[in-house]
Amino acid sequence: MEGSGAGRPSAGPLAHRVPDLGALELLLAVARLGSLGGAARELGITQPAASSRIRSMERQLGVALVDRSPRGSRLTDAGALVTDWARRVVEAAEAFDAGAQALRDRRDSRLRVAASMTIAEYLLPGWLVALRARRPDTAVSLLAGNSAVVAERLLAGEADLGFVEGLSVPSGLDSVVIARDRLIVVTAPGHPWARRRRSLSAKELASTPLILRETGSGTRQVLDVALGGLARPLIELSSTTAVKAAAVSGAGPAVLSELAVGEELSLRRLVAVPVDEVALRRDLRAVWPTGHRPTGPARELLSLTRS
Amino acid sequence: MEGSGAGRPSAGPLAHRVPDLGALELLLAVARLGSLGGAARELGITQPAASSRIRSMERQLGVALVDRSPRGSRLTDAGALVTDWARRVVEAAEAFDAGAQALRDRRDSRLRVAASMTIAEYLLPGWLVALRARRPDTAVSLLAGNSAVVAERLLAGEADLGFVEGLSVPSGLDSVVIARDRLIVVTAPGHPWARRRRSLSAKELASTPLILRETGSGTRQVLDVALGGLARPLIELSSTTAVKAAAVSGAGPAVLSELAVGEELSLRRLVAVPVDEVALRRDLRAVWPTGHRPTGPARELLSLTRS
DNA sequence: ATCGGGGCATAAGCTGGCTTTATGGCCGAC
DNA sequence: GTCGGCCATAAAGCCAGCTTATGCCCCGAT
């Protein structure tokens, strides 16, 4: 898998070639404050520690990142670029942290959220980061499961706000649509369909073996309904990630939520195939027990999600 | 652990609450291979090291991530979710690595790229990751600068392929449009314009003090031309990031590339203000010396960028 | 039944990297 | 000229994570 040939530009685990999160965070602080010492204070370490850490990062990357002067430090041009890239890593780490923190099951949480997988995977961490920015003291707990589980928790009073992606709203719940998701057909760039300009008809789609999620998953459900229960599996896999991987490797066409393939499409690891106006849209909804409109933190979170 | 006060959900540097990149990478390998030992082998560490690392990650997050069995390890439900979030962090780190590696100025690189800031910041790392996947042995070097610098390097034979975002193509260069960028007006959600439904006219825009990049930057140039040289600065800042930060903090309306504010918009830290059909579009172009069509690695990279 | 192999956990010892404390030099402001 | 902010260097301590060395479990093949 990883080139063992001649002038290998990269080798070994990523962690050995990328500064750790602490160093990246420090770099962002330096960029923001214009001083190594200041950044050190903000992160609760000493100035020599910051100095040494930045220096070793520069050694690792082989590029000077900051211009030191007796009056402060400013980023070099390369440093500014690196800092921007670093910011993305740190933002992803923040989303990770927000999600992980919520996963830890804390009974005393002020806001208990139950969400379907797709939403928990792709949208919720971002919302949690935003929520944390506005209400830093709100402890959030997260439970991920299918629509039935979400409904059950809400009705049992064990969750304050839910998010589902099904076609219908479980009974006993009020809801509001917060976004629309579309299922799209994708293939590896080499597949014949990748060059297709004419839309696929529902019939063609139904008669071609596809890489699919297992029966019962939200995604599969929507597709089966749209095609009249006729979707033909080439392989059935139990996670979105596995489906993506199979599609990328060229195993065949796959049907996936557009939320799941943004990156793959923009890097052309996958290509979207145009499809007739089959009803492959589904609503993403926030849900709560009928009558109990969200209040407090739940209302706050809800307001972050109206897209 | 460190919580001292009330229910503060988070405190201290991110790095103390998020597993390091090595651990996340390990988790992805476990997910992919279904075995701790297998993942350990792939990353070049011993099985006990992997075991201990996963275990300490579980302690840190307070969640069981893998189900161990004498026949292998599978992710728990929570583990699958965490793994998906981890994948995003690792992907950002890969982009960082690809960019950083290219920044290191290596004369012997097979592919020397010169790019304008916006492109180098937001698009190039992704392309480099994709390129690395297809041509692992291609060493790439990157120089970031404005259009003039890019042109100069290309014409001097010191770069093989360039990317610029100006309104015009520097003379002596051939080009192809690879994407379109749009400048958009954004404000903090609290600003009166955030609730506006009617488009702003060019005149209104020109008569309102805005948070802007400094005169001479590509972004500012486009805006000045679109408004007839009349843009009125409220503050002038020297980096996109600084402009964003000012806008988020509510200092006023800002004008930025849509590439720069995707995240901020989707999390509602910023709101886009509709604008009349002012010519705020600009082409992003790949450029090369007239007559010298890109070949080899340059051609390969170029083919990744046609969006 | 038994043996071999794959897989995981635990124990003990080592090492390297990051920190801290302690100084010293540089520069501008008062 | 002296004070204060900022950075670098040196020396010493600490901890995380790695490795080596075992042991147990389960399954399938002989």
Image (cartoon, coloured by chain):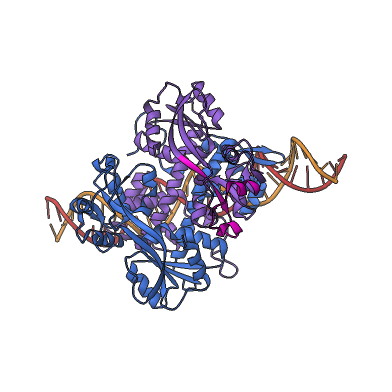
Chain colours: A blue, B purple, C orange, D red
Q: Return the residue nearer the eye: A34 or D17.
A: A34
> Which residue shows up at 43% across the image and 41% down it?
B126
Q: How many marks?
A: 0
**Residue B43: image x %, image y %?**
37, 45
Q: Return the residue nearer the eye: A64 or B303.
A: B303
**Residue A134: image x %, image y %?**
57, 63
Give the left or right position of residue B48, taking residue A298 as reference. Answer: left
In the rendered image, the vertical position of residue C26 relative to residue A48, given as above or below: above
Q: Return the residue nearer the eye: B212 or B87.
A: B212
Q: Is residue A43 magenta?
A: no
Q: Is residue B212 visible?
A: yes
> Which residue shows up at 35% across the image and 38% down it?
A2
Q: Is residue A109 visible?
A: no
Segment tinted magenta in the rendering: B180-207
**Residue C11: image x %, image y %?**
41, 58
**Residue B255: image x %, image y %?**
58, 46
Q: Return the residue nearer the eye: B291 or B246.
A: B291
In the rendered image, the vertical position of residue A143 relative to residue D1, given as above or below: below
Say which quadrant the C terminus of chain B sits in: top left
Q: Is residue B189 magenta?
A: yes
In the rendered image, the vertical position of residue A47 relative to residue B179, given as above or below: below
